[in-house]
Image (spheres, rainbow, N blue to C red):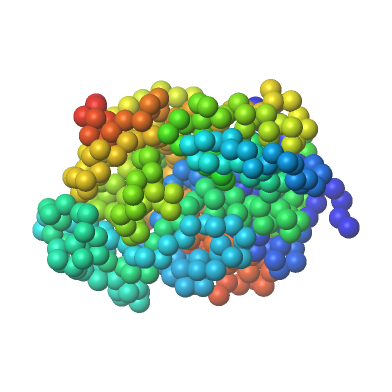
Amino acid sequence: MNTVVDRSKDIGEFVPQPDDDMLICRCEEITKGEIRKAVHDGMWTLTEIRRYLRTGMGLCQGQTCSRLVKGIVARELGVSPAELEPATSRSPMRPVEMKVFGSEA
Amino acid sequence: MEAKNSADVIVIGAGIIGCAISYYLRKRGKSVIVLEGSDNIGNGGSSRNGGGVRQSGRDPRELPLAMYGIKNLWPGLSEELGVNCEYHKEGNLRLGKTPEHLKILQGLTDRAVACGLDVKMIDAAEVKKINPHLSDEVIGASWCPTDGHANPLVTTLAFYKKAREMGVRFITGEKVERLRKVKGRLREVYTKGNVYEGEYVVVAAGYESRDILATVGVDVPMHKELVECLVTEAEPHMFNQMLGTAEADFYGHQSDHGSFVFGGMSGLELNNKNTGPKNSPSNAAITAPCICRGIMKYFPALEDAKIVRTWAGYLDICQDGVPVLGFVDEVPGLVVACAFSGHGFGIGPAVGEQMAMLICEGKTSVDISGLQYGRFKAKI
């Protein structure tokens, strides 16, 4: 996408919300509050959130939570979810045992 | 206060090197603007490497930096940056299965011992004592007890977070097109839409540094090489050492999370067809299976561990395999920190601190004389 973004832009203070304890990424057990805090730590892209918190890095590889994470980050930044690039999908599509993967190619 | 787009130092590249340099500069009171060409902080090798924080196996020219960082910076880093970087200083085993392997390991060990590093050769029984999960085919290893590993993704973002909190201005999606000297000294940095100005300009943009530096007549002889990594699902805790092999079949560790992170190559990278987007690192179908076979030869117990993810990244390999660091005689005001050749993560904090010292005081406390740009000469 490559748009110029000044990471010092003021997005306001972190304000606690009653449902911050809600689990968003079930595989890695990351809550809504942790995701919102990470945005205030400077993690403004879905790729950075994922690398910082491990959201979407568990067994389902984000197939369950990535849309929810996107919505939370977009709201915190005050932008439309459509403006946020999804994190890169990585192979394999499903978890594969090493002995099976190792027999390929 | 300075004009909008000027600062004491402009840093190009927000990988671990650029983020660490900007943090240590800010700590010394300098104003800093960091320009990152991609949309993400730490998008190159900084987020794609295997997490090694090692001294063993390193070239004598860069070993002082590696040793300095492990002694002075890494142990307190998580506390200093306020983020758990998952650093473990619990040793590195470089494994061998054949007499030829042991010969390679002995050579690496002798060179490191000559530089004052605590590393030694150990036999099969000692290896088993340190790591009981290894295959019986391992006949020996080199053992460096002060080596270790950390989480490269989090460490890079931790430097960014702390530096940003302290007032460093990070701008992403701001790709640098050229540098410009004013009255014989490097001063201006041009992007598509903006001009930035600083007393010093640091170029720490990985392989992309080459095109940027070329605009002021500096050419670092380096090329790109693709390496791939894979990660398993979380497994019960087995060991905390960093691992490698004499023939570099793979390298890796078990993370705090429980997953195993392993990196490696197929050996065909130079001529493999890149099936992904241009200039973007993507996995080749043959590489991850090759890494799996390498791992299973040393860790048969991991054959049922499930791979959940694979990824690829480029190394910026220097002509002589060690980084280019420091001032450049031909261009006053320029500081180069690139061509890390796959060794940038472990020495990142030390490079950051020493480059900040170089800019503020004109000299480093660690010997980096073997890493200067001026070392490249034709052979005759």
Quarter of the image for residue B144 reads bottom left
Residue shown at the point (60%, 26%) measured from the top left: A67
- Callout count: 0
Query: Compared to B32, does B205 lie above or below?
Result: above
**Image location of residue B180, percent across then percent down:** 71, 46
Query: Compared to B146, does B134 lie above or below?
Result: above
Residue B23 relative to residue B254: left or right = right
Q: Which corner quadrant holds the C terminus of chain B? A: bottom left
Q: Which corner quadrant holds the N terminus of chain B? A: bottom right
**Image location of residue B328, percent across then percent down:** 59, 59
Residue B49 relative to residue B176: left or right = left
Front-most of residues B260 and B53: B260
Residue B372 relative to residue B288: left or right = right
Query: Compared to A93, does B206 lie above or below?
Result: below
Residue shown at the point (38%, 26%) measured from the top left: A94
Front-most of residues B134 and B290: B134
Quarter of the image for residue B304 reads top left
Front-most of residues B113 and B134: B134
**Image location of residue A76, percent across then percent down:** 74, 37
Q: Is residue B210 visible?
A: no
**Image location of residue B321, percent across then percent down:** 39, 54
Residue B152 relative to residue B169: left or right = left
Residue shown at the point (47%, 60%) measured from the top left: B87
Residue shown at the point (47%, 73%) measured from the top left: B71
Q: Is residue B82 visible?
A: yes
